Amino acid sequence: MSFTWVKQNIDWLEKAAPHTTYYADIVKLLKPWLRQSDSLLDIGCGTGNFAFAFAPHVKKVTAVDINPLVIDLLKQKCTDLGVKNVYPIEADWRDIPLGLTYDVVFMSYINGLASEHFLKLATLSTRLIIAVLPKFGREKSFGLENYLDRTEQKGSGRETFYKAIDFLKTRYIPFKAMEHSCDFGQPFDSMEEYYYFLNFYFGLEKQNIPPEYTSKHLQKTPQGYYLPNLKESGIIIIRKEDVNESQKF
């Protein structure tokens, strides 16, 4: 299943992001690797939560996404927040011209590291390639793996942390790996929004959502409801000097 930004999932992410430490945690782990003079390319930047988290720690963030909806939103957020060193660009990162480079190339939850596109990443970087990847597929999100039959489970189709590690090991590319987990749940204004969310992401019809799942996981809040989610990620850091660009992938 491929992922596409539309207004609904953009709205859900913007609603959820203030309630998680995910972005700040990851950047804190990466801070020893960053330099204030760095230019950083944020591939598949989405609504810019990582771009803004990186901005105080580097000279410049070029935030690239193929979807015009998120880039328009990110441009507006840069204006509203007065952030001067984040530069949103609507583009496919694979089309960035040869010769255009960045000190750090960063990607989060998108494909490209464990693939034929790896060397493209390497040509874009002069110092580091950093990838944040899911440890598991989307079917394990929100604790649903305990309630769905395998035939109902939808994998995300994304590369995983473990797949990327295997890819790098078989090509003898040195890397540093770290793991991270934290809550990245979803707030809802109403029960109907909760039902819509599970249908949107997991194809669950309202009548097929197990009552025991809702009673165990969905929390009532003063603002509405909250569905917790343990987001389990892996971080891979590769030094450009350790990549042999003549190697066939």
Image (spheres, rainbow, N blue to C red):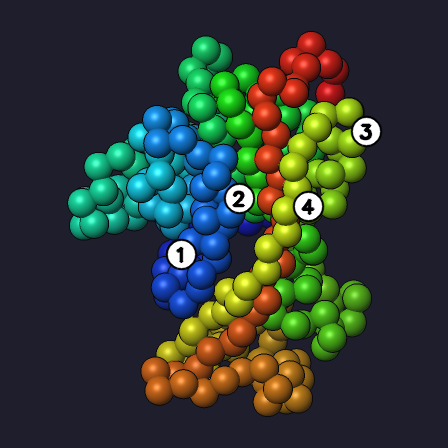
Instruction: Determine whether 157 is above or below 42 in the image.
Output: below
Amino acid residing under circle 3? Thr
Amino acid residing under circle 1? Ile
Query: Which residue lies under the disc numbered 1?
Result: 10
**First of labels 2, 1 by sequence position:** 1
**First of labels 1, 3 by sequence position:** 1
| Callout count | 4
Circles 4 and 1: CB atoms closer than 8 Å: no
Mark 3 Cα shell of 10 Å, populated few (<14), some (14-19), many (≥20): few
Q: Position of residue 53 (x, y in %)?
A: 37, 47
Mark 4 Cα shell of 10 Å, populated few (<14), some (14-19), many (≥20): many
Question: Separation of disc 3 and disc 2 at Cα?
Answer: 22 Å
Question: Separation of disc 4 and disc 2 at Cα?
Answer: 11 Å
**First of labels 4, 1 by sequence position:** 1
Query: Which residue lies under the disc numbered 4?
Result: 161
Circles 3 and 2: CB atoms closer than 8 Å: no
User: Which of pointers 3 and 2 indicates the residue nearer the eye?
Assistant: 3
Instruction: Determine whether 103 is above or below 9 in the image.
Output: above
The residue at 65%/19% (across/down) is: 243
**First of labels 4, 2 by sequence position:** 2
SS type, badge 1: helix
Amino acid residing under circle 2? Ser
Residue 8 is at least partly visible in this image? no
Instruction: Determine whether 111 is above or below 209 in the image.
Output: above
The residue at 23%/42% (across/down) is: 83
SS type, badge 3: helix
Query: Which residue lies under the disc numbered 3?
Result: 170
Question: Separation of disc 2 and disc 1 at Cα?
Answer: 16 Å
Mark 1 Cα shell of 10 Å, populated few (<14), some (14-19), many (≥20): some
Query: Which residue lies under the disc numbered 2?
Result: 108
Query: In this orientation, which residue lies closer to the viewer: 121 or 129?
Result: 129
